[in-house]
Image (tube, rainbow, N blue to C red):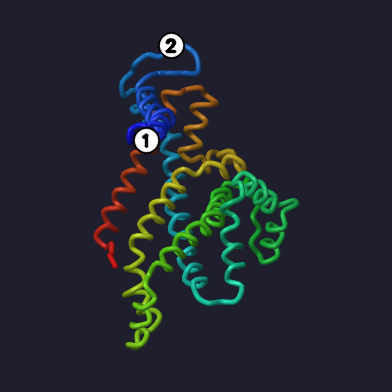
Amino acid sequence: MAYAFIAPAVARLGLVVFYPTISSLITSLTDAQIIGPRNFIGLGNYAELFRDPRFWNALRNTSLYAVVTAPISVGLALIFALLLNRRLPARGVFRSVIFFPFIVSLGIISIAWAFMLDPQVGILAAWLSEIGLPIGNGVRDPAWAMPAVMVVGIWRNTGFFMVLYLAGLQSIPREINEAAEIDGASGLRRFRNITWPLLANTSLFVIVIAAIFSFQAFDQMYVMTSGGPFFSTETMVMLIYSAGFKDYRLGYASAVSWILVIIVLAFSLIQIGYFRKKAVQY
């Protein structure tokens, strides 16, 4: 009876997770295209991508995006969570406003930001020019394209991470902080010695999710810049899309996707190992 109950879930996982995963691994070892025969070439696609300057450019762009957006998003989320965990007037409104970008389609958000940053009609571009920060050609400028998509990613994801941190803060027994306050501990000391250690489990989840979000960045690049100008915002997911659905090189695209899987998995395991040592039970 138990196997009968789990059979639908197992079947769904097999169809939408396990089969595509194994199929993509096999495809990465072939010269598969949209049509035509598939020939086994072993590690040929992997050898080619390591010689491909476009792959290294995409890896560099992805790493830069992740290194900047993930820490800033997580840091802002923690600050907002600490502020909005207090008894403040209209804190529910502020929580909703900060969380709202996450529930809106990233494609729609990217279109709106592209208009706001347009040097001809964008209100944000006009404001920046007024304070002495002209943005040139906006997202069509190589110097501003990557910062623009970074801002969109940070603005969208911060609210989601804030909600996760709020859940973690509200799970900490209030008596612990009250006892420390009675003993004369300052707010900063309570955060350093009580709140932050007790948030280790939450921080593990938030940081891993933030890293995955960053390495999978695609929507705002596709909508705002199409990976340009001059490939300055082309990420690894953009490269996978371009190789698979524009150049029809499914084998090469699958190889790039597996390199991305390995990078994300390695980063996640490092984070899990680090925070497991700091996990606190209470």
Q: Identify the residue at the far top of this view.
A: 37
- The residue closer to the viewer here, 101 or 130, is 101
Residue at position x 44%, y 63% in the image: 167
Identify the amino acid type marked 2: Pro
Q: Identify the residue at the far left of this view.
A: 277
Q: Is residue 191 left or right of residue 97?
A: left
Residue at position x 38%, y 82% in the image: 178
Q: Quadrant of the N terminus?
A: top left
Mark nearer the N terminus (2 vs 1): 1
Report the number of numbered marks: 2
- The residue closer to the viewer here, 143 or 101, is 101
The percent coordinates of residue 24 (x first, y second) are 39, 27
The percent coordinates of residue 70 (x first, y second) are 44, 55
Residue at position x 39%, y 29% in the image: 14
Q: Is residue 47 left or right of residue 55?
A: left
Identify the amino acid type marked 1: Ile
Q: Return the mark for residue 128.
A: none
Residue under label 1, please give it.
Answer: 6
- The residue closer to the viewer here, 274 or 15, is 15
Q: Secondary structure at mark 2?
A: loop
Depth check, mark 2 against mark 1: the one in front is 1
Q: On screen, 59 above or below 121? A: above
**Gap between marks 2 and 1, in whole Å?**
37 Å
Residue under label 2, please give it.
Answer: 37
Q: Is residue 49 left or right of residue 154?
A: left
The percent coordinates of residue 57 (x first, y second) are 45, 39
Label 2 CA crowd tier, 10 Å (few <14, some 14–19, many 20+): few
Tags 2 and 1 in contact by the CB under 8 Å rule? no
Residue at position x 35%, y 84% in the image: 185
Image-quadrant location for residue 175: bottom left
